Amino acid sequence: MTFDLLSRGENVLFVAPATVDQSTFIQVKSSAQDQVGAEGQTAFEVFDRVAEAPLNKSSFNVIYSNLFSPSVSIHTPSIFSRYLNTLSADGRLILEEVVLLDDLANTVCPITRKSSDLESLLKLAGFVDVTVKNVAPVSDETLAAHFGLWGATNIEQGVSRLSGKFGIAHIEAKKPAYEVGQKISLRFGSKKKAATNNNKKALWATVPTDDLEDEDALLDESDKVKPSKESLTRPDDCELTDGKRKACKNCTCGRAEEEEMEAQNNVVSLDLMDDFEDEIVEVDPTPKKTDGCGSCALGDAFRCSTCPYLGMPAFSAGEKIALGGMFAQDDIEF
């Protein structure tokens, strides 16, 4: 591991699996501390619990993730999100991960991603300037160490079958040069507006004044006189009837409401029902046995629609109608 990008005063975070060699880590941390000086700080966090680690927001300038070999740790979206939150504005992330160089057929393997997949995940997490610096093929010796970390039993067979299929991707990315929720003032169109005004002035300056009309010459002395209050008062144009103004059909001046209120005040109500007693009129609801057409006795074919004899048989004038046979009997026998 090299730390050519470290500067004095920077805070650096190392993230590595718990299987890292302790002597190697102490040597790397000491070298990094010498580069950042007393003003800087170096810290270490285990890869498996970095997503839940109590890391302060925007507290590190550089994060080195999974750079200690051998390692088969896989970065997840939650880890990338935590890295983005922990880095300061414009902070750097340098990481390594085992990736596929070629697609595997009929093989079950913990490694399923290529370097392009890691690049996409970093961009989706919010990182910028994501660059795949290098993808170095994994040697057979390192591949055997990876199989040991995966817990494989037949390591030699796995190495012989998957040799040359894996690589270690070295990727660098940056956090944007602003914090989440940061507010800045935006100025839209100030320079453009000033330039537009200058262009308008320059354009009008090119117009010859001889072609312009003097607007003061269009007014006479009467136009310059200030109007009086009486001249601005709306004239009373209501219709004159019997010496009085009468409201127009579509009155808007309020005269129609005044006339309506005046008419209501002049109405006198008279109660004339007290001078009369209730008169009872008796009406016989039965139809009268007189006809106006003279054809009632001839039968229904000759009767009117309002004839009182509709439905009765023909009879002679003056004859009393009597129903016989079954029609003379009651429908209900007691």
Image (cartoon, rainbow, N blue to C red):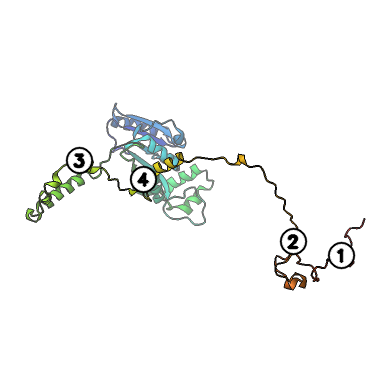
Residue at the (35%, 41%) spot, across then down: 94
Task: Give the label, 4 or 2, closer to the camera.
Answer: 2
Q: Is residue 260 above or below residue 58?
A: below
Relative image position of residue 81 (x, y in whole percent): 41, 39
Q: Earlier in the sequence, mark 1 or mark 4?
A: 4
In this orientation, which residue lies closer to the viewer: 36 or 319? 319
User: Disc 1 versus disc 4: distance between alpha carbons?
Assistant: 118 Å
User: Residue under circle 2?
Assistant: 288
Q: Which mark is residue 228?
A: 3
User: Disc 4 versus disc 3: distance between alpha carbons?
Assistant: 89 Å
Residue sitting farthest toward the left: 210
Residue sitting farthest toward the right: 334
Give amino acid for label 1: Phe
Q: Are marks 1 and 4 in contact (CB under 8 Å)?
A: no
User: Residue under circle 1?
Assistant: 327
Q: Which mark is residue 170?
A: 4
